Amino acid sequence: MEKKKKSTVRKEKKIVGTLSSRGRTFRGIVVKKFPHRVVVELERTVKEKKYERLSKKKTRLHARLPAEMKVKEGDAVRVRETRPLSKIVHFIVIEVLGGKEE
């Protein structure tokens, strides 16, 4: 009787500075900028069951901004989940995608 080897698939772990990031990745627009932190707004469509329509919902995430990244309000960025860095910051900016996203 032969034992089958289990295939182990490692999830991608991206390290920004000394922080490792894991978990969900989102793409959004910077709506506010603070020292070392930004507020990223995500827009998604949700189906309203009662009215049988689609509606737009917005979610705001607070993300850590590494010192080497230059971001302005209105820029599109990619954020990724990390360990809790403070009471409200649980994400880190991993990539600046450019100007305003339409």
Image (spheres, grey):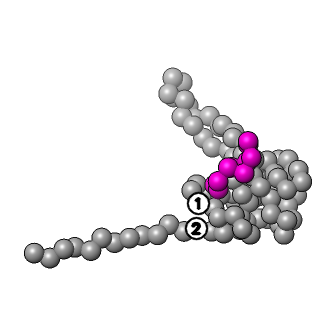
Chain part drawn in magenta: 81-90
In which quadrant will I find the N terminus?
Answer: bottom left
Q: Main secondary structure of the magenta part?
A: loop
Residue position marked by numbered label 1 in the rendering? 22
**Mark drawn on residue 13:** 2
Q: Residue furthest top?
A: 50
Picture mark count: 2
N-terminal-most mark, 2 or 1: 2
Query: Residue 101's x, y, as percent?
Result: 76, 56
Nearest to the observer: residue 59 or residue 86: 86
Residue 47 placement, left or right of 18: left
Label 2 sits on a secondary structure element that is loop
Camera-nearest residue between 76 and 33: 33
Q: At numbered mark 1, what does the secondary structure look like: helix, strand or loop? A: strand
> From the viewer's perspective, is 58 left or right of 51?
right
Label 2 to label 1: alpha-carbon separation: 6 Å
